[in-house]
Image: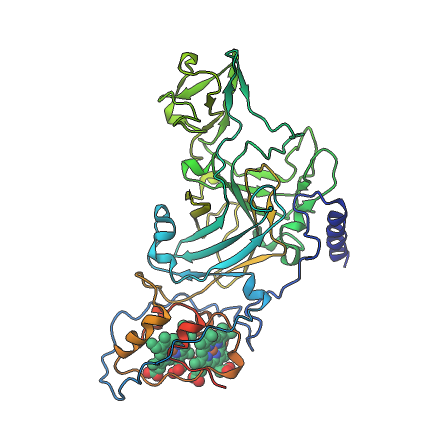
Amino acid sequence: MRRSSFVIAALAAMLVIGVACAPAPTAVPPTPVPTTAPPTAPPPPTPVPATTAPTPAPTTAPTVAPTTPPTPAPTTAPTAAPTTAGQADASTLVALSTTTAPKLEALADDPGWARAQALTIKVSGGQNLTAGATTATLKAVYTTDTIYFLLQYDDPTNSVRRSPFVKQADGTWKKLTDPDDKGGDNNKYYEDKFAFIWTINNSIKGFDTAGCFAACHAGEPGKPYGNKYTNAPGETGDIWHMKTVRTGTVGQVDDQFLDDTKYNKDTAPEAGRKSDANTGGGYKDIVLKDGKPEFMNKDAKPANAGGTYWLKDADKVAFDDAKFKANDDVASILVAPYQGDRGEIPAAMAWKDGKWTFAFSRKLVTGSKTDVQFDNLNSTYLFGFAIFDNAQVRHAYNTGALRLRFSGATAVPTGPATTAATTAATRAATPGAGVPKAIPVNHVGRPQCLICHLTGVAGAPKVAAAPDHTAFKDETAVCMACHVQAK
Ligand code: HEC
Ligand code: HEC
């Protein structure tokens, strides 16, 4: 009781103060959501029985002779699925089992993503973006040892001009700063970022209802946008912090963590936000030495004329002032991939036509104390998510907790996803298959199907091997190309 009243009081305080590490939107307090999905299901599908390790998909076509001719394909286009998805579904990302790891560099073009169901995450309340808000879609697939994510969202600007050094008319160099920045609050010359926070071992109290708000402390002196730290020793989070200029350019998400360290302007200016250990590499500020940047790119191109706003360590040479004229920009950050614990999230990214796309991965189990361990695929993992558009701390956020579950499904074949339009052909080409049964009335509103029917969890009858149901996209409309909805 003390705990929940604390959380409520903290949220109320944020509403009043209006400035927090993630202030609540005025009308939408985080709604507690049930920990199992989907809500309309009679028996909840979690926990998946411990024995449901992914079973291998059938690799051969059934050999039985056709006993009944395949029923004619439906002549009408399948009707759209009912859209009454409940809260738990709307906040749950289901990672699909796959035998083929998607290639990160292929980004959204990798065929491995096609069958994964996207989680839509609305974020708002940040600086910049369009009215401070955007909508992200997130997909996940996993192999026996690694989980892969595909993240996309609209951001009208690719913000790369992260406080460069600018050559002045008088030949001196000055770092470009946001004139309104009163400390740690750059919203003009920064970079695009996103961040996940996962509870490690479900240790952060209140996270299941409040999400990242559980670690958000508004109204503390010294910080314009609140502080982030957990409330008690032992409550720790895993932070995955994509910094597009500082770590994205070297193919990584910064692997950090969160503990209960309170803000102190001298000893803990970052409060509970900390970085995983590293054994080398990483980003570093370039300093002015004798009034000039210490390094430049060996190509000597100004960042605003064909160069970059970051300097890869391998490209750095001693600075040559003669190469630059007034108003030239030069990178102020030296970048190299982290080695060790901090560098365990490889990533690829691209910004195109007002949209960011990121693909990144992590080993299911790293063994590090400062990482979430996806070591129980029958478990549900809570996370929060934020997007930063050219903003150091003022991120757009969603309220409440998001959830990751593992499908425990059989292998997902590669190749283009089967859509409702192509299922009829598949069916005609599946001799030997019986007549598909009607979808029970109590199913109306379920947005996903294979979550139960591939594994047979919660007493669901398992899908047929022929036709190969693992090839179907997990959408009601696809299923309804063959299974009619009982009235
Ligand atoms: C929460 C788990 C769950 C989800 C999600 C689910 N089902 Fe079911 N399904 C069941 C269970 C349990 C049954 C057994 C009958 C019942 O409980 O109504 C069943 C029965 C069925 C049957 C009848 C099978 C038979 O032998 O009569 C069909 C067809 C079916 N489901 C299709 C679907 C489709 C299509 C979807 C997606 C819209 C879906 N199911 C989503 C659990 C689920
Ligand atoms: C191309 C047609 C087709 C599509 C699309 C299809 N199914 Fe089926 N399904 C069948 C056939 C045919 C059977 C029966 C096989 C048998 O009994 O030999 C079947 C069997 C099943 C069964 C076992 C119970 C039963 O009806 O015999 C479940 C459960 C099921 N399907 C669920 C789904 C779900 C969920 C989807 C959507 C992801 C889906 N099906 C998509 C054709 C299809």
Q: Nearer the viewer, residue 279 or 125?
A: 125
Q: Residue at x 43, y 52 (%)?
A: 150
Q: Quadrant of residue 42?
A: bottom right
Q: Residue at x 64, y 30 (%)?
A: 181
Classify 141 as above or below 456. above
Residue 462 visible in the displayed image: no
Looking at the picture, how far across and down is residue 356, in whole percent?
Answer: 46, 46
Classify 275 as above or below 139. above
Looking at the picture, how far across and down is residue 126, in whole percent?
Answer: 61, 44
What colour scheme has been applied to the protein in the rendered image?
rainbow
Q: Residue at x 42, y 36 (%)?
A: 249
Looking at the picture, how far across and down is residue 83, in whole percent?
Answer: 53, 70
Q: Residue at x 49, y 69 (%)?
A: 48
Q: Is residue 65 left or right of residue 152?
A: left
Q: Nearer the viewer, residue 254 or 46?
A: 254
Q: How many numbered dots are placed on residues in this image?
A: 0
Residue 79 visible in the displayed image: yes
- Split into 4 quadrants, where in the image is the N terminus? bottom right
Looking at the picture, how far across and down is residue 379, in whole percent?
Answer: 52, 62
